[in-house]
């Protein structure tokens, strides 16, 4: 496809330079700038020649999708803060207006870098592999004829041109939709008129040619046939554009019915009036752009001129091509050795009674652990009750939800807390909640004001006349789709105190409680912040050791405690995939605050806390990151890991993450840079190989 090419450059060096700071050292870094730094690390994978071609396309699609959600949420929050006149400064000292200006500056630069990565790296790599994103007008007669037929049979019946003039009000343009602004002229009066044509979102973004390796953007196919949509009119010009609206709406705190409140949020999101971004192609004339700005009632500073195809997240379509030689080698997760069938049978409860089991996804099988745990509970006549939290589930086919429904239909007591407010999964969760209710499951629709983010499952079973409980606690969602690409850990245990705590937790979530006391688990928002702060303070001494593996670290109170611990003598290693507001350069002991981030084939997602070293250390796994929302506004669970063998497994994850020099970046407060390659350790590959050896019984 013909787009403006930029001069070749070394993208990783450019991305590193763009994150470097020249101002005085702030104590807390800006959260939005830090998030964009993370997405730059994702984008760098798209520009890495050592990444398989279709995986590079996937990484570019991921970075584009991430940026879309960033605009819908953070872009909306910042715009609303300015419009409502808020004056509160962020922890890094910026006013709402300064935050929005920084957001606009950094996102505009990021969009330009995405364009450049596509033009100078991804598109040529695809071309070199025989995969072409072609221009319709450069195709031969046979290819055009194929697309002409496709337009007539598949596109034309669903397209609806909408005129824009005094007789026709400007149409509502939905968020994330791809559109064509078409200027036509009446052949008699020569009067110019504008119309909008929406590209059908239900059809693939790229129209495939018969060979299967060449594709044309759908808007080009439509553009080539505009005479069929505007018969008798002269087509003057046409230009694609894409709109992003705010999607961050708060629940009405006065709403008694949480289900109706969430439905209201979905309605407001669909009809959001707040435009936070308009993407246009570089050839759009000023008069068309000005018309869009005026009719959309938006700020021209939120217009992004794009040189690559609009909506690069559509590259997921190409990344899904059946070309295994252009992708990472397929990894088949192994079944944890403790969960393998023994003595000719399979009994997950017997395995967990014998010893706690730690499972590491995606290297170890989700179906053989989390899914099997609930499936066996649903089928087992000795099981009396199953209690489950559900935050993000899989599309239309969730084996865990099917098992919960089957359990309820056979008379078991089944409780499911379905978090309706999981952003962008609300509609799916509403549908699942209704299906569960219809089957007789007691469904809890979350708690107003608190998202239930904890990932826990509890099974109550009668054994030899006694009640025995089993639980599964995870750092990731009960979603078999994401379990194949998200790195997470989960604990299966029958520990009496831990399981009793889980019963108390579910009772607190389903009933009324003010101050529940737990013996083993640590629950937010009541206790987690205080417990973690105490553990940090305990290690604040010469010889103290702290290692935290997280997705985000932006909580000022926790950051202050880490600064104090390092300056008192503790050695601190932080493995933070995403946002990190801690600035080592602002510390009096920057050498004791080491921060790194791994970006690779799998999304690093587990949260592992280690305080101390050796037998006296405390190990916790949790669903919580160190962010105000997790510590203060969510129900989160951290569970201690006490078995020495399982603690060794957590050590392996942490230490490989700290020695990796294939996927790792490091942060010194002035910028993120790639860790120099010396040993070639790829933590994800090493963990995959380790799981295979361990579960085959190889020492």
Image: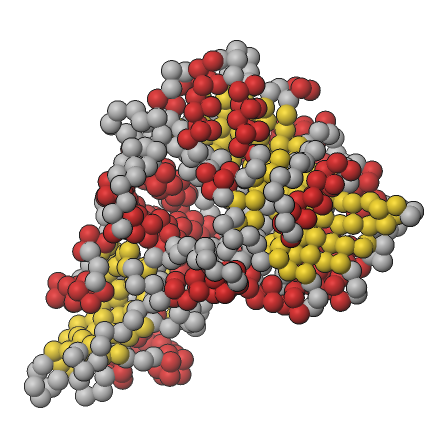
Asked if one can make out residue 462 in the rendered structure from this viewpoint, the answer is: yes
Asked if one can make out residue 368 in the rendered structure from this viewpoint, the answer is: no
Q: Which residue is drawn at 30% across and 39% down?
A: 88
How far across and how far down the image is residue 157, in percent? 37, 83
Q: Please state, as top left, top right, bottom left or bottom right, where the C terminus lies in the image.
A: top right
How far across and how far down the image is residue 474, in percent? 63, 43
Left or right position of 542 against 472: left
Question: For residue 48, which quarter of the picture?
Answer: top left
How far across and how far down the image is residue 548, in percent? 53, 29
Q: In this view, does 257 lie above or below 535?
A: below
Q: Which of 358/113 is in front?
A: 358
Q: Which of 551/599 is in front?
A: 551
Q: How is the image coloured?
A: secondary structure
Question: For residue 358, which quarter of the picture?
Answer: top right
Q: Please state, as top left, top right, bottom left or bottom right, where the N terminus lies in the image.
A: bottom left
Q: Residue at x 45, y 44 (%)?
A: 51
Q: Is residue 699 above or below residue 470?
A: above
Q: Which of 134/591 is in front?
A: 591
Q: In this view, does 246 lie above or below 508?
A: below
Q: Farthest residue in the right direction?
A: 464
Q: In this view, does 608 lie above or below 318?
A: above
Q: Residue at x 78, y 60 (%)?
A: 412
Q: Residue at x 28, y 45 (%)?
A: 86
Q: Farthest residue in the top direction?
A: 542
Left or right position of 646 against 241: right
Left or right position of 453 against 663: right
Left or right position of 493 against 3: right
How far across and how far down the image is residue 355, in percent? 79, 36
């Amino acid at each position: 496809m013909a787009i403006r090419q930029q001069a070749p450059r070394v993208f990783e060096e450019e991305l590193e330079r763009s994150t470097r700071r020249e101002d005085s050292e702030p104590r807390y870094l800006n959260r939005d700038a830090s998030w964009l730094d993370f997405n730059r690390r994702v984008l760098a994978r798209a520009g890495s020649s050592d990444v398989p071609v279709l995986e590079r396309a996937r990484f570019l699609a991921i970075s584009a999708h991430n940026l879309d959600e960033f605009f819908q949420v953070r872009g909306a929050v910042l715009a609303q803060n300015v419009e409502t006149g808020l004056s509160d400064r962020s922890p890094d000292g910026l006013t709402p207006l300064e935050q929005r200006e920084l957001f606009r500056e950094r996102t505009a630069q990021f969009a330009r870098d995405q364009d450049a990565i596509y033009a100078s790296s991804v598109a040529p790599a695809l071309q070199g592999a025989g995969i072409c994103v072609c221009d319709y007008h450069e195709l031969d007669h046979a290819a055009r004829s194929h697309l002409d037929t496709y337009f007539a049979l598949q596109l034309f019946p669903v397209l609806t041109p909408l005129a824009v003039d005094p007789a026709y009000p400007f149409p509502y343009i939905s968020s994330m939709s791809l559109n064509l602004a078409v200027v036509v002229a009446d052949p008699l009066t020569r009067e110019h008129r504008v119309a909008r044509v929406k590209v059908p979102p239900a059809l693939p973004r790229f129209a495939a040619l018969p060979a299967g390796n060449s594709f044309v953007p759908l808007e080009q196919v439509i553009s080539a046939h505009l005479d069929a949509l505007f018969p008798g009119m002269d087509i003057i010009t046409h230009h694609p554009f894409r709109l992003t609206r705010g999607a961050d709406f708060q629940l009405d705190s006065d709403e008694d019915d949480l289900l109706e409140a969430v439905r209201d949020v979905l309605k407001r999101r669909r009809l959001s009036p707040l435009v936070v971004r308009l993407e246009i192609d570089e050839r759009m004339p000023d008069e068309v752009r000005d018309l869009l700005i005026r009719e959309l009632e938006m700020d021209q500073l939120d217009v992004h001129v794009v040189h690559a195809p609009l909506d690069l997240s559509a590259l997921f379509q190409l990344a899904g091509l059946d070309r295994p030689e252009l992708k990472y080698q397929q990894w088949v997760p192994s079944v944890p050795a403790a969960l393998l069938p023994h003595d000719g049978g399979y009994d997950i409860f017997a395995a967990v009674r014998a010893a706690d089991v730690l499972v590491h996804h995606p290297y170890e099988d989700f179906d053989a652990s989390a899914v099997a745990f609930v499936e066996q509970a649903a089928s087992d006549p000795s099981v009396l009750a199953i209690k489950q939290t559900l935050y993000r589930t899989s599309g239309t086919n969730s084996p865990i939800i099917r098992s919960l429904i089957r359990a309820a239909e056979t008379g078991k007591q089944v409780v499911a807390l379905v978090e309706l407010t999981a952003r962008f999964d609300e509609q799916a969760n509403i549908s699942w909640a209704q299906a569960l209710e219809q089957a007789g499951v007691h469904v809890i629709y979350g708690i107003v004001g608190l998202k239930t983010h904890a990932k826990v499952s509890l099974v109550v079973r009668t054994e030899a006349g006694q009640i025995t409980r089993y639980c599964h606690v995870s750092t990731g969602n009960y979603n078999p789709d994401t379990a194949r690409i998200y790195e997470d850990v989960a604990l299966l245990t029958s520990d009496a105190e831990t399981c009793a705590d889980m019963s108390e937790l579910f009772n607190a979530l389903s009933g009324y409680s003010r101050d529940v006391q737990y013996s083993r688990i640590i629950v937010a928002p009541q206790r987690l912040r205080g417990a973690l702060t105490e553990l940090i303070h305990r290690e604040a001494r010469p010889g103290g050791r702290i290692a935290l593996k997280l997705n985000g670290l932006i909580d000022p109170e926790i950051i202050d405690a880490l600064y104090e611990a390092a300056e008192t003598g503790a050695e601190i290693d932080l493995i933070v995939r995403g946002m990190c507001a801690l600035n080592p350069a602002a510390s009096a002991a920057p050498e004791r605050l080491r921060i790194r981030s791994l970006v690779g084939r799998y999304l690093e997602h587990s949260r592992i806390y280690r305080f101390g070293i050796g037998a006296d250390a405390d190990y916790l796994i949790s669903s919580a990151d160190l962010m105000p929302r997790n510590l203060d506004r969510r129900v989160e669970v951290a569970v201690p890991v006490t078995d020495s063998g399982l603690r060794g497994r957590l050590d392996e994850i942490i230490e490989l993450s700290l020695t990796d020099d294939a996927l790792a970046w490091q942060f010194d407060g002035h910028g993120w840079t790639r860790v120099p390659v010396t040993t070639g350790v790829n933590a994800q590959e090493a963990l995959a190989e380790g799981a295979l050896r361990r579960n085959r019984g190889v020492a």
